[in-house]
Image (cartoon, helix red, strand yellow):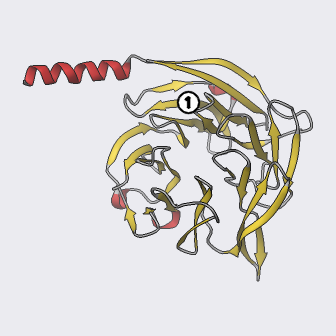
Amino acid sequence: MKLNLTIVLLACIATLSAQTVKVTNHYEITPLTEQSAFCPVISPDGSKVVYTAHNFSGLKSYDLATGEMKIITNADGAGFDPVFSLDGSMIYYRPQSRIDGRVHRSLDEYNLNTQKTRQLIAPSRDIKRPVAIAGGMEVVADNKLMKSVGSKIEGCYVYSVIKEGKIVVCDGKSTRVLRPYGDQVESYLWTSISPDGNKIATYAIGKGVVILDLNGKILAELGNFEAPVWYGNDFVAAMKATDDGHQYTSSKIVLLDRHTRQAHDLTSPDEMGMNPSASAEAGKIVYNTLDGKIFMLELSITR
């Protein structure tokens, strides 16, 4: 029995490692009307991209099939972590304003079909990044998990409390705090849950990109990369940047395999690729370069 189990395990490992990640197409998609564009986010079906300015001011959408560009808003901060609805028809974003000298954020919804905007949550000091769910979105605002009308809270919602060095997992009924590295890590960034709702990807300062289960158990340490985003349930797209203490000297886009811990280079370091956004459904990753150009990667993964 022990011998048979060993053979099975070795076969599983071989299957996981026998995979090929190939870039089948790589091209610029910066809208012709733009001199620079940053922080692109791709829709679930890969047909649209939203992007912003270098300081997150304003938010625009770009239809890859028609070449049509739409201005969603010119509001400050609107380009920081916008989110598509699951069907790609809505954009959720958090414009910022100052009230009594303090920064507040609201949560707004933009309908790409009707081109109409409505405010879902009034300006608040604490609105986390929304997450798309069936029928709309869910978000934590002022320590409460909320959902849009017509949607249903499903699974868990995760977010980082950056200044306190912890990750919070909540499901609308209970909340638990994760500190997988204890006092070794001061902050966690770019924290998100996998599409199947079973795993967490985050960037632990001093440790790199880490995969956790919902109880905070470390499943995989993937290396010193930044800006992780899920590409399906088994891969994470990220960036690897270097600097000289004053400015970036190189940056590349990679795809990380959570099973084998292998990093697949998708771009060259001298291209200065940053801020990846991924759609495994469409087999695409978008990113911007340091000088404000947006590029598309089309991938093929075989096992």
The answer to which of 207 and 155 lies nearer the viewer is 155
Q: Residue at x 44, y 34 (%)?
A: 234
Q: Residue at x 62, y 39 (%)?
A: 244
Q: Residues within 10 Å of mark 1 (few under 14, many from 20)?
A: many
Q: Position of residue 249 (x, y in %)?
A: 65, 34
Quarter that holds the C terminus: top left
Q: How many marks?
A: 1
> At numbered mark 1, what does the secondary structure look like: helix, strand or loop?
strand
Q: Position of residue 8 (x, y in %)?
A: 20, 21
Q: Position of residue 217 (x, y in %)?
A: 31, 50
Residue 200 sits above or below residue 42 on the image: below
In this figure, which residue is indicated by the disc labeled 1? Answer: 254
Residue 270's quadrant in the figure?
top right
Three-letter code for the amino acid on which mark 1 is drawn: Val
Residue 62's quadrant in the figure?
top right
The answer to which of 155 and 251 lies nearer the viewer is 155
Residue 198 sits above or below residue 186 on the image: above
Q: Is residue 221 visible?
A: yes
Quarter that holds the N terminus: top left
